[in-house]
Amino acid sequence: MKKMLLILLSCIVLQSCFVNAKRDYNGYSKTLVFTKQDKWLINNSYTDLNSYDRDKLNKEVFSLFNELSSGNVYNLEKAKSQNLITGRIPFSPEIEDIEQFKNSTDFNYLVNIYTKKVRNGLSVVEPSEQMQYASNEAFAIIEIYDIKNVKKIYYQKVYSSQSREKETKGPSFHYSSETLSKKNLRKILKDIKKNAIIKS
């Protein structure tokens, strides 16, 4: 009986934790080419996550690009401390911004990261009947710009959600929008690593 109850509870948890995730490359290639001579700049994340989660994700992004670029990556803090750049870099730069950046630095690529908690209408555990439709939703985006050629070369967005229909009986378990945001960004990082081409 105890074993049966445990199996039933496990099934409820697994079903409740199903996440509907959608990936969008917006027409860009999913492949990034890394060569040892190219310098990468990781911009600060534009996010509504707390400072601890933001810093942790910034480190994860930096770590991956550092690995793929053979150590030829800089974050904004390091680049500014070495006087390689000055001022703030917009998340979605215009052509003029990239041209200005091209003329003032020797970086090859700029990486912008964005996460957004769209909706957080469900608790981690909903024990009772749902009185109205509710959902948790979030997305993450990584965009990469080729500075020397003044153009965007990469875009990936992962949007995920969990929902609970009106009159759904409890209990059910959900990821918060914060957790969805982090999962979304990590999905993008995993995809970048999987599809990366490393050249000497």
Image: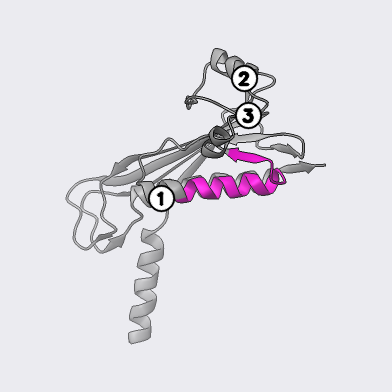
Whether residue 183 can be seen here: no
**Seen in the image, is 178 located left or right of residue 114?**
left
Picture quadrant where residue 196 is located? top right
Q: Residue furthest right?
A: 200
Secondary structure found at label 2: helix
Q: Around disc 1, counting alpha carbons within 10 Å, would you say few (fewer than 14), some (14 to 19), or many (20 or more)?
A: some
Q: Earlier in the sequence, mark 1 or mark 3?
A: 3
| Residue at image coords 41%, 64% | 14
Residue identified by numbered label 3? 28
- Of residues 61 and 128, the one drawn nearer to the viewer in this rendering: 61
Whether residue 56 can be seen here: yes
Residue identified by numbered label 2? 104
Q: How far apart are the alpha carbons under marks 2 and 3?
A: 27 Å
Q: How far apart are the alpha carbons under marks 1 and 2?
A: 32 Å
Q: Residue furthest top?
A: 96
Q: How far apart are the alpha carbons under marks 1 and 3?
A: 28 Å
**Amino acid type of the residue tagged 2 in the rendering:** Ser
Name the spot of residue 131 as percent of width and height, x first.
17, 50
Quadrant in which the N terminus appears: bottom left
Which residue range is magenta in the image?
56-74
Tell me, for residue 53, which label it has, or none. 1
Q: Earlier in the sequence, mark 2 or mark 3?
A: 3
- Of residues 34 and 8, the one drawn nearer to the viewer in this rendering: 34
Is 61 contained in the magenta span?
Answer: yes
Is 102 contained in the magenta span?
Answer: no
**Amino acid type of the residue tagged 3 in the rendering:** Tyr
Secondary structure found at label 3: loop
